[in-house]
Image (cartoon, helix red, strand yellow):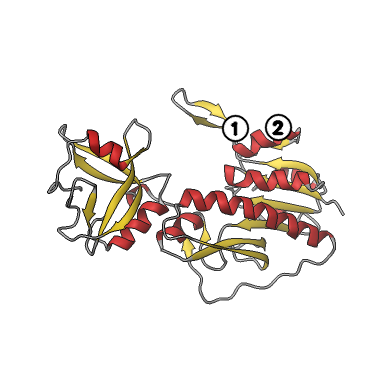
């Protein structure tokens, strides 16, 4: 049975779920997304990916700056939605909004709750070297990702998988999972289980101060750090290529044989010593340039064994 759905989301990650909901024949009565924001060199206002997708479907779009007043709550109630679906919306839903849909608010969260509650579950799972993660459909409460879970889909994290690759995989799998959850909900067949109290971790937002590579860490941790921040914001190191220290973004690495003082270039193939073991550069990016394979970069760089990355 089709449901009346309010969809709430903002980034690329949320678009496949909106597309799937529309494709399943549910009536999307409103799409909530973050307001247009300045972007690009000209800083012109740009709508969110969800906003653009909603317009392609001819769906009504709302971009309130806040939901924390009675006017916003009244507008939300006026949709008479059966359920709200929330995917990376980027705003806290107050109780008046959470209580409005008859069947509640369902959130698609990109982790195996209660591990990695919070803002950056995909990056944190990769940075921590987790062997698996997943997506969960959760009924929302006022707490931060504390609600009971209705459906889960597990996904293996390959040893060289980047956060960007995992993001795309979870986005597609999550869209299918939410579609199945809504189908079950419409039949009265979606049950929820409270999250366990053990195993709670928080995926705090990625800070700019975390992007610089700490070469004193073991090679495996450096490797996980790099792939967890790839492609955005990108882990980086400082190196002098003949014009003074400059930033080199490191997007992909591989574990390698070798040892030396942390940050030391061990050979012209781009092997770098870590606190324990070594990594080899695979893909890098200079400021203002596009990503390139490390061997291409190294052919044109003033790079020699014994150089030190900071």
Query: Considering depth in this image, is 143 or 257 the residue closer to the camera?
Result: 257
Picture disc at residue 212: none
Query: Callout 2: helix, strand or loop?
Result: helix
Tag 1–tag 2 contact (CB < 8 Å): yes
Q: Which residue ends up furthest to the top in the rendered image?
A: 42
Task: Indicate left or right for 222 with 200 as reference.
Answer: left
Task: Indicate left or right for 76 with 222 as reference.
Answer: right
Q: Quadrant of residue 180?
A: bottom right
Query: Considering depth in this image, is 239 or 211 the residue closer to the camera?
Result: 239
Q: Quadrant of residue 288?
A: top left
List the residue tagged with mark 2: 55
Query: Considering depth in this image, is 26 or 155 the residue closer to the camera?
Result: 155
Please indicate, yes or no, whether residue 69 appears anywhere in the rendered image: no
Q: x, y (%) of residue 174? A: 64, 55
**Could you tell me which residue is drawn at 39 percent across and 50 percent down?**
207
Q: x, y (%) of residue 90? A: 57, 47
List the residue tagged with mark 1: 47
The quarter of the rendered structure image containing the N terminus is: bottom right
Q: Which residue ends up furthest to the right in the rendered image?
A: 1
Query: Callout 1: helix, strand or loop?
Result: loop
From the viewer's perspective, is residue 283 above or below residue 40? below
Task: Indicate left or right for 97 with 65 as reference.
Answer: right
Q: x, y (%) of residue 254? A: 33, 54
């Amino acid at each position: 049975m089709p449901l009346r759905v309010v969809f709430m989301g903002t980034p690329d990650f949320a678009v496949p779920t909106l597309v799937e909901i529309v494709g399943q024949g549910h009536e999307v009565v409103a799409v909530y997304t973050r307001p247009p924001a300045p972007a690009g060199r000209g800083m012109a206002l740009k709508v969110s990916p969800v906003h653009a997708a909603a317009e392609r479907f001819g769906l009504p779009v709302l971009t309130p700056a806040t939901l924390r007043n009675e006017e916003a709550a009244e507008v939300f109630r006026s949709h008479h939605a059966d359920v709200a679906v929330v995917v990376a919306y980027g705003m806290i839903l107050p109780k008046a909004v959470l209580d409005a849909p008859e069947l509640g608010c369902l959130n698609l969260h990109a982790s195996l709750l209660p591990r990695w509650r919070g803002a950056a579950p995909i990056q944190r799972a990769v940075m921590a070297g987790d062997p698996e993660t997943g997506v969960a459909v959760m009924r929302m409460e006022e707490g931060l990702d504390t609600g009971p879970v209705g459906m889960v889909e597990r996904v293996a994290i390959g040893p060289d998988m980047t956060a960007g690759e995992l993001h795309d995989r979870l986005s597609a799998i999550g869209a299918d999972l939410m579609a199945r959850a809504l189908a079950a909900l419409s039949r009265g067949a979606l049950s929820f289980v409270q999250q366990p109290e053990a195993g709670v971790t928080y995926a705090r937002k990625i800070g700019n101060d975390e992007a610089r590579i700490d070469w004193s860490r073991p090679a495996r941790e450096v490797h996980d750090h790099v792939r967890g921040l790839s492609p955005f914001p990108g882990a980086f190191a400082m190196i002098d290529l003949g014009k003074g220290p400059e930033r080199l973004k490191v997007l992909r690495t591989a574990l390698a044989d070798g040892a030396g003082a942390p940050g030391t270039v061990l050979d012209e193939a781009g092997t770098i010593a870590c606190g324990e073991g070594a990594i080899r550069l695979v893909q890098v990016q200079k400021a203002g340039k596009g990503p390139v394979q490390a061997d291409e970069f190294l052919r044109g760089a003033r790079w020699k064994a014994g150089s030190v990355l900071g």
